[in-house]
Image (cartoon, grey):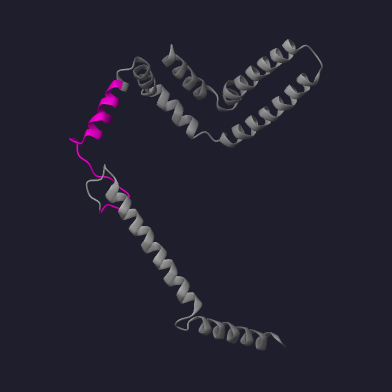
Amino acid sequence: MFGRPLLIATILAVSWSSNAWAQPGSAEDEMIEELNRVKQMQANSMQMLNSMNPLSSSPSLQGGASFGQADPAVQQLMQNLQSLEKNPVVQTLRNALQKPEFTRALDQILRHPKKKELLYAQIGWILFMMLFRAWRLSRPGHWLLKIWTRLWTFALLTGGTALVVPTIILGEPYLMIIRSLIGAWK
């Protein structure tokens, strides 16, 4: 009974209010103009920053730097990269990361369907270890015993979080990655 007249009244009220907003010089137009002014000021600030950038050869670039191989900054960066590549640790790590077994294992882990279960298991393990550690440290004892308890519970927490829980859930691909990384540091 009241449905149709109420609908018509609602439509008329909405159309009247939208017409009131569309008047030129209204508060919405002023807010839009203010927004445009702020955007223009931001663009001018970015252009000024680009013009002051010593690595930028073109101040008209928005947020990017353009430089060639003769630029001293590029030459310094290349020298730093070459000296870093000569480091034996970097070479062994690079060789370990480029092995097909490593990339295959990493791909298997990234596509593993139980990644969410791993997250939940690690959260559960950390919470369990927090409670276990609090229980072990709550017993009165010698200060040296408390230091020892902190040490072995930290080792258990770290080993469980980094090795045991992921190995149980992810399996052999995770162990392959750990072996490759440990082999690179030997």
For residue 184, side relative to residue 3 (left or right)? left
Indicate the quadrant containing the N terminus: top left, top right, bottom left or bottom right.
Answer: bottom right
For residue 1, side relative to residue 157 (left or right)? right
Asked which quadrant contains residue 76, the reply is: top left
State the residue in front, 137 or 30.
30
Indicate the quadrant containing the C terminus: top left, top right, bottom left or bottom right.
Answer: top left
State the residue in front, 5 or 136.
136
State the residue in front, 22 or 8.
22
Where residue 36 appears, x then y in whole percent? 40, 67
- Position above or below: 73 against 10: above
At 69% from the left and 12% from the top, the residue drawn is 148
Where residue 54 appears, x then y in whole percent? 26, 43
- Position above or below: 97 against 13: above
At 59% from the left and 37% from the top, the residue drawn is 116
State the residue in front, 146 or 59.
59
The residue lying furthest to the left in this view is 70
Where residue 153 appears, x then y in whole percent? 68, 18
Span of residues in magenta: 60-83
- Position above or below: 25 against 144: below
The residue lying furthest to the right in this view is 140
